[in-house]
Image: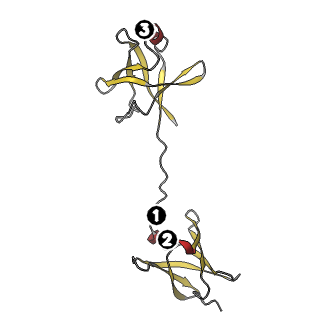
Amino acid sequence: MAVSAGRINKLFGTDGGVMLSLYPAFPDDFDPATTPLLVTIDALDVPLWCDRFERRGISGATATFADIDTERRAEELLGLEFRIEEPEAEEDDEFYLEDLIGFAVVAEEAGKEEKVSGTVSDYYDSDANPLFELEIDGRSVLVPAVGEFIAHIDFEGRTMHLVLPEGLLTLE
Protein backbone atom coordinates (compact mmCIF):
# COMPACT_ATOMS: atom_id res chain seq x y z
CA MET A 1 0.00 0.00 0.00
CA ALA A 2 1.37 3.40 -0.98
CA VAL A 3 1.23 6.22 1.56
CA SER A 4 1.34 9.91 0.78
CA ALA A 5 4.90 10.94 1.67
CA GLY A 6 5.54 14.42 0.27
CA ARG A 7 5.31 16.99 -2.51
CA ILE A 8 7.67 18.15 -5.26
CA ASN A 9 7.96 21.90 -4.63
CA LYS A 10 10.49 23.68 -6.83
CA LEU A 11 13.50 23.31 -9.06
CA PHE A 12 16.96 22.88 -7.59
CA GLY A 13 19.93 23.47 -9.86
CA THR A 14 20.04 23.18 -13.64
CA ASP A 15 20.32 19.40 -14.08
CA GLY A 16 16.68 18.52 -13.36
CA GLY A 17 16.98 18.54 -9.58
CA VAL A 18 13.99 19.35 -7.40
CA MET A 19 13.29 20.28 -3.80
CA LEU A 20 10.90 18.06 -1.89
CA SER A 21 8.68 18.69 1.12
CA LEU A 22 8.51 15.52 3.18
CA TYR A 23 5.39 14.63 5.14
CA PRO A 24 5.65 13.04 8.61
CA ALA A 25 4.83 9.66 6.99
CA PHE A 26 8.08 9.79 5.00
CA PRO A 27 10.29 6.97 6.34
CA ASP A 28 13.51 7.86 8.14
CA ASP A 29 15.20 4.83 6.61
CA PHE A 30 14.27 5.64 2.99
CA ASP A 31 16.61 3.86 0.57
CA PRO A 32 16.48 5.52 -2.88
CA ALA A 33 18.28 2.55 -4.44
CA THR A 34 15.41 0.16 -3.67
CA THR A 35 12.30 2.34 -3.37
CA PRO A 36 10.93 4.76 -5.98
CA LEU A 37 8.76 7.80 -5.31
CA LEU A 38 5.36 7.22 -6.95
CA VAL A 39 3.57 10.10 -8.68
CA THR A 40 0.35 10.11 -10.68
CA ILE A 41 0.63 11.49 -14.20
CA ASP A 42 -2.39 11.27 -16.51
CA ALA A 43 -4.08 8.84 -14.08
CA LEU A 44 -1.09 6.46 -14.19
CA ASP A 45 1.24 5.64 -11.31
CA VAL A 46 4.75 6.53 -12.41
CA PRO A 47 7.79 5.47 -10.35
CA LEU A 48 10.52 8.08 -10.01
CA TRP A 49 13.87 6.45 -9.23
CA CYS A 50 16.27 8.78 -7.44
CA ASP A 51 19.75 9.17 -8.90
CA ARG A 52 20.53 11.44 -5.97
CA PHE A 53 18.58 11.98 -2.77
CA GLU A 54 19.76 14.20 0.07
CA ARG A 55 17.82 15.01 3.23
CA ARG A 56 17.66 18.68 4.22
CA GLY A 57 16.43 18.77 7.78
CA ILE A 58 13.41 16.87 9.02
CA SER A 59 10.90 17.87 6.36
CA GLY A 60 12.94 18.61 3.27
CA ALA A 61 15.14 16.96 0.67
CA THR A 62 16.67 17.48 -2.74
CA ALA A 63 16.54 14.87 -5.45
CA THR A 64 17.38 14.15 -9.06
CA PHE A 65 15.57 11.41 -10.91
CA ALA A 66 16.65 8.93 -13.55
CA ASP A 67 15.60 10.10 -17.05
CA ILE A 68 14.83 13.64 -15.86
CA ASP A 69 17.93 15.63 -16.72
CA THR A 70 16.70 19.09 -17.71
CA GLU A 71 14.87 21.92 -15.97
CA ARG A 72 12.03 21.70 -18.50
CA ARG A 73 11.38 18.02 -17.74
CA ALA A 74 11.62 18.64 -13.98
CA GLU A 75 9.09 21.51 -14.24
CA GLU A 76 6.45 18.95 -15.28
CA LEU A 77 6.77 17.37 -11.81
CA LEU A 78 6.32 20.59 -9.79
CA GLY A 79 3.34 20.50 -7.45
CA LEU A 80 2.89 16.73 -7.68
CA GLU A 81 2.37 14.77 -4.51
CA PHE A 82 4.39 11.57 -4.23
CA ARG A 83 3.77 8.34 -2.40
CA ILE A 84 6.00 5.58 -1.12
CA GLU A 85 5.12 1.90 -1.11
CA GLU A 86 5.07 0.65 2.45
CA PRO A 87 6.82 -2.68 2.77
CA GLU A 88 4.40 -5.54 3.26
CA ALA A 89 4.32 -6.61 6.84
CA GLU A 90 5.73 -10.05 6.96
CA GLU A 91 3.36 -12.49 8.48
CA ASP A 92 4.85 -14.07 11.50
CA ASP A 93 4.58 -17.72 10.58
CA GLU A 94 6.83 -18.72 13.44
CA PHE A 95 5.23 -20.27 16.46
CA TYR A 96 6.37 -22.37 19.36
CA LEU A 97 4.92 -25.76 20.15
CA GLU A 98 4.09 -24.60 23.67
CA ASP A 99 1.74 -22.07 22.00
CA LEU A 100 -0.50 -25.05 21.21
CA ILE A 101 -1.30 -25.73 24.88
CA GLY A 102 -5.06 -25.36 25.31
CA PHE A 103 -5.85 -26.15 21.68
CA ALA A 104 -8.61 -28.67 21.00
CA VAL A 105 -7.14 -31.75 19.35
CA VAL A 106 -8.61 -34.41 17.08
CA ALA A 107 -6.36 -37.44 16.85
CA GLU A 108 -6.56 -40.56 14.75
CA GLU A 109 -4.29 -43.49 14.18
CA ALA A 110 -3.07 -44.06 10.64
CA GLY A 111 -5.18 -46.65 8.86
CA LYS A 112 -8.11 -46.38 11.30
CA GLU A 113 -11.26 -44.34 10.85
CA GLU A 114 -11.97 -43.80 14.56
CA LYS A 115 -11.05 -40.36 15.85
CA VAL A 116 -10.73 -39.12 19.41
CA SER A 117 -11.07 -35.59 20.71
CA GLY A 118 -9.38 -33.85 23.57
CA THR A 119 -7.09 -30.94 24.40
CA VAL A 120 -3.38 -30.27 24.45
CA SER A 121 -2.81 -29.97 28.20
CA ASP A 122 0.98 -29.58 28.23
CA TYR A 123 4.16 -29.60 26.18
CA TYR A 124 7.46 -31.11 27.28
CA ASP A 125 10.40 -29.61 25.46
CA SER A 126 13.31 -31.93 24.84
CA ASP A 127 15.80 -31.99 21.99
CA ALA A 128 15.69 -35.79 21.97
CA ASN A 129 11.93 -36.30 22.31
CA PRO A 130 9.54 -33.33 22.55
CA LEU A 131 6.09 -34.45 23.72
CA PHE A 132 2.52 -33.20 23.78
CA GLU A 133 0.42 -34.21 26.73
CA LEU A 134 -3.12 -34.77 25.49
CA GLU A 135 -6.13 -34.97 27.77
CA ILE A 136 -8.47 -37.49 26.10
CA ASP A 137 -11.53 -38.90 27.83
CA GLY A 138 -10.17 -38.07 31.30
CA ARG A 139 -6.78 -39.69 30.76
CA SER A 140 -3.40 -38.20 29.90
CA VAL A 141 -1.64 -39.46 26.80
CA LEU A 142 1.89 -38.50 25.78
CA VAL A 143 2.54 -38.31 22.02
CA PRO A 144 5.63 -37.15 20.16
CA ALA A 145 5.44 -33.48 19.19
CA VAL A 146 6.87 -33.85 15.71
CA GLY A 147 5.83 -32.23 12.46
CA GLU A 148 5.10 -35.47 10.62
CA PHE A 149 2.27 -36.27 13.09
CA ILE A 150 0.63 -32.83 12.82
CA ALA A 151 -1.82 -32.94 9.91
CA HIS A 152 -3.28 -29.45 10.39
CA ILE A 153 -3.26 -26.53 12.83
CA ASP A 154 -6.04 -23.93 12.81
CA PHE A 155 -4.70 -21.01 14.83
CA GLU A 156 -7.90 -18.97 14.58
CA GLY A 157 -10.11 -21.87 15.66
CA ARG A 158 -7.45 -23.07 18.13
CA THR A 159 -7.64 -26.66 16.91
CA MET A 160 -5.06 -29.23 15.84
CA HIS A 161 -5.47 -32.48 13.89
CA LEU A 162 -2.98 -35.28 14.56
CA VAL A 163 -2.45 -38.46 12.55
CA LEU A 164 -0.45 -40.86 14.73
CA PRO A 165 1.19 -44.23 14.07
CA GLU A 166 -0.95 -47.27 14.76
CA GLY A 167 -0.89 -48.39 18.39
CA LEU A 168 0.21 -45.05 19.87
CA LEU A 169 -3.24 -44.20 21.25
CA THR A 170 -4.53 -47.75 21.64
CA LEU A 171 -8.05 -46.75 20.66
CA GLU A 172 -10.42 -49.36 22.04
Sequence-wise first label, 1 or 2: 1
Say above or below: 133 vs 68.
below
Say above or below: 161 vs 44.
below
What residue do we see at 36% from left, 23% from top?
52
Sequence-wise first label, 3 or 1: 3
The residue nearer to you, when weighing 109 against 7, is 109
The residue nearer to you, when weighing 112 against 115, is 112
For this view, does 73 lie left or right of residue 171? left
Q: Mark 3 points at which residue?
A: 71
Q: Position of residue 20 (x, y in %)?
A: 38, 20
**Marks 1, 2: nearer the viewer:** 1
What residue do we see at 60% from left, 89% from top?
167
Q: What residue type is labelled 1?
A: Phe
Q: Which amino acid does label 2 sit on?
A: Leu
Sequence-wise first label, 2 or 3: 3
Q: Name the residue under label 2.
A: 100
Q: Where is residue 68 in the image (x, y as percent from the top left)?
A: 45, 15
Say above or below: 172 vs 122.
below
Q: How many marks?
A: 3
What residue do we see at 52% from left, 86% from top?
141
Q: How crowded is mark 1: few (under 14 residues within 10 Å), some or many (20 or more)?
A: few
* Element under disc 1: loop
Q: Where is residue 158 in the image (x, y as percent from the top left)?
A: 56, 68
Q: In which quarter of the image is the C terminus?
A: bottom right
Q: Which mark is residue 95?
A: 1
Residues under labels 3 and 1: Cα distance?
A: 54 Å
Marks 1 and 2: CB-CB under 8 Å?
Answer: yes
